[in-house]
Image: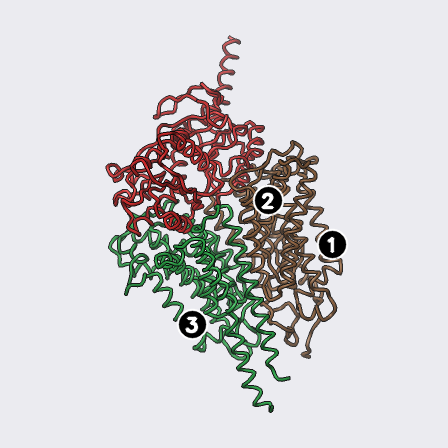
Amino acid sequence: MKKSFVKAVMILAVMTIAATSLVAQSYAIVFKNTGNPYGEKQMAGFKAGIEEQKFEAILRAPDQPTAEAQIAIIQQLIAQRVASICIVGNDFDALTPVLGQAASAGIKVFSLDSSVNPSARLTHVNQADSVKIGQTLVQAAYDMIGGKGQIAILSATSQASNQNLWISYMKQELTLPKYKNVKLVKVAYGDDLRDKSVSETEGLLKAYPNLKCIIAPTTVGVAAAGKVLTDKGLKGKVFLTGLGLPSEMATYIENGVCPYMFLWNPIDVGYLGAYVATALVKGTISGAVGDKFSAGRLGNYTITKAPDGGTEVLLGPPFKFDAKNIADWKTVY
Amino acid sequence: MSERSISVDRPRSLRRFFFQWEWLLVLIFIAVNLINSSLSRYYLNLRSLVGSTNSFLDMAFLVLPMTFVIILGNIDISVASTVALSAVVMAVSFNAGLPMPLAAILCLVVGTACGLLNGLIMIKFKELSAVIVTLATMIIYRGIAYVILEDQASGHFPKWYSFLAWGSIGPVPLILIVFAACAIAFGLLLHKTSFGRKVFAMGNNLTAARYSGIRTDSVIVAVSALTGLMAGFTSLFLSSRMGSTRPNVALGYELSVIAMVVLGGVSTAGGSGRIGGPILAVFIIGYLNYGLGLVNTTANVLLIIIGSLLILSVLVLNVRFGGHRRPAPPGARVIAPGKAPDEKA
Amino acid sequence: MSAEAKAPARARANRSGEGFRELGLLVFIAILCIAFQLRNHSFLTLANIKDLLDNTAILGILAVGMMLVLITGGIDLSIGATIALAGMTSALTGMAIPRINPLLSILEGMAVGLVIGSVIGILVARFKVLPIIASLGLMNIVRGVTYIESKGAWVSAYQMSDDFKSLSTGTTLGVNNLVLIALVIFALFWYFVNHTKTGRRIYAIGSNPDAADVSGIPRRKLLWLVYATMGVLAGLAGVLWVSKFASAQGDTALGYELNVIAACVLGGVSISGGSGKVSGLVLGTILLGMLNNALPLIDVSPFWQQFIQGIVILAAVLTNVAVKRNNQRLALRKRAI
């Protein structure tokens, strides 16, 4: 009699603790800046994933894309004792100390989209294989220009970690013998500002009159380049590809200035991040290579080794947007 | 009886004493804390309250000399670039083999040099306003930082270096202690030394100050160098907080610093202000950001709140009693008969 | 020489001294043109100059408004946010009403700008808030409103009507619309500040507010007018910006006010109020536009761009000072003692 009573009390206690911890647990995502539709979709996907699992999601983004602002936000999250922080880093290294503070406080820290230093994160959720992104973009340029000619890259800021990573893989890909007739003449920085991206594109066109293709792995840059090429009537003479939002690039894909470009679904990226968060907190995974977990409607995933020395989870291959499917996607994001 | 009053001393009365800008700021500070603690249960935790100061105090080091600059009637928008350049030079020289303590001193030296250059250009080319000089140097200094580091980060500082930004002595963060010391030093400098009096005099009327024998050039250079030195302090604490540095650190700091000084009751017309105001403003804005962040206010709403706070607090004071002076015309100021100097003429 | 005969001679000397005020800047720009052309022969081509003017037109429109504000001794840091809000609002309206006349979009943007400018004007003129605080506060508020209004999304090219997009890219009488609008505004303001009573009064307010008050100039009304005008121009610039880039973002023109202030100050507009000429403004705007246009063109590492830009600006300003001092020395020599 006493035994079963004690058992009942213990079960009740465990249930209460589980219930309160379930209700109290909040999962945070910190994006790069506010007002960014790509970020909004990513955070929406994260929120959907977290709420699907009956937890509370906290979505934060600073008004300026600086590391200093993200440090302040992370400190506020630590004070709120969140269960996990998913960081889309504005700087690869600068968040290391504050994320270390979070980890010491028992918070599970991982990065998404724009990675942080492996010493500061348990794992990283990558939209697509960074090496593959570089390869795909270079291959696309190669196909568009018919195998030979000058190409240039229009990037965001010179400090953006994911940009620099992709560019380094692009340069690596270009050393292959297949690309011996393709010459990368310049990497220009548009700083993700419309007006600067336009000036840099115009500068590229004038400084390199034989330029055949521009690769712009940034949503603002590729749209700005698309506008410039359209306005100057350079369709067919100078090609454009890169990573862009289907909504921003719809006009330029439809008018042919950009034959095709790539991206992935940010909603799915966020959603995957949500399941990584809960899996880390539950203990299902620890961020090591080989860990497996289930990500709701996306299926099962395994953690793999990342090229920067840490580990990562890959969403899938980059998705190609061209004239055939752009009409379907331009209203989604 | 109407008579011209050129007295600078305010007539003493209890009403005057309490209707000063700083008291309004104290009220706002208390209000901010009350609102914050009612919004979030995580706020009134002494440890995190005191500990959270390290997220906004690195900027506060710039507020102290900026007070001097604005009282002088000038402005300095190159401070953020000085922070970036001195941090970059320090990091690069440390990684090139210089021992960390020396690299830190180099950081302060570079900062002071940048400030010194500002001051020298200003006194040699008096036709140029402070805005244009510091605008040019703002672009140049950060430009040099980009030339040095390009797209890299530099860091890997020794373990003890992170104690600067993250360490505490007891429950009090080190940065708060250092800031308090600097604040006291600057306060004494401004209000209790002849140097401070000279700054006020020059802000009030540069020509008259020069003719009364004040070495205006030396004062301007000294204030500029001081600004550069404190920018060095900021970059020490900032790079410690981030564990690394890039050419794009401290982006946008100058605007926030100027906002804090102006919220603190220092008029951009020059010649008036007290060190207490900007210090209070630092904590008001810092705790407001922190408290609202604890309830995860979105950045959009936060922008609106901070902007409204800025305007409303100034509005209240102006509606009550005159507030800031108009920008002074060149030459002597005419004070209308019968009115005290700081009332609206 | 009698006193009356001396006066016209002195006046003549003064006028020629003023005419030379911008000479230093003009010479500097000429030298810079040559330097850039040597570096890349496509700099001084018609196509490039067209691009340059296109990209500088919006800066020019804003500089005119900022000049008025600076002349009164004030400052307006909120124009970047105003551009964003005006542009976003007109873009969202264009999305909701696809067949809207683009001129109505312009009017809508100008109305948004007018509201923001008026608020600043009232704060500065009626409530004696310092312009820097008023515009700083409003900058934050307006930016926040822009993000909230857009719900974090952008308005993309496919959501804008062709008429709207051709506002900025179209041509009228062979000249690009943007450049035409900028020229018209420059001409209007040149006339306004030099040949109307109100324009001259605005200089008076900035030069000596107390004297202006005493001489019966309606200071408060004119101050409000100045900020409202800046707002309207910023609103116009916002619509043109969104049309030019075929995209409306929440963070449009973040920090752009600094470029505008730089253009004004380079052009000789005094930050403490009371002086500034439209001719200097044009030169300042062109210099800045040239830098933005030429830096990507010349073959320098992108990491040197900012440094070069800063050095050029500093050199331009110092050259101007040197020339001015030289002229003053010469003018002094001419005077009969």
Colour of chain A in the rendered structure image: red
Give above or below for A182 relative to B265. Answer: above
User: Which residue has dot 3 on it?
Assistant: C190
Q: Measured from the top left, where is residue B166 in percent x and y?
A: 63, 36
User: Is residue B246 or residue B23 the one in the foreground?
Assistant: B246
Q: CA distance from mark 2 to mark 1?
A: 23 Å
**Eye-nearest disc, 1 or 3:** 3
User: Which residue has dot 1 on it?
Assistant: B188
Colour of chain C in the rendered structure image: green
Mark 3 — on which chain does it sit? C
Q: Secondary structure at mark 3?
A: helix
Res. B35 in view: no
User: Which residue has dot 2 on it?
Assistant: B56
Residue A5 left/right relative to A126: right
Q: Which quadrant of the figure contains the N terminus of chain C?
A: bottom right
Q: Amino acid under label 2? A: Phe
Q: Amino acid under label 3? A: Trp
User: Is residue C41 or residue B71 the one in the foreground?
Assistant: C41
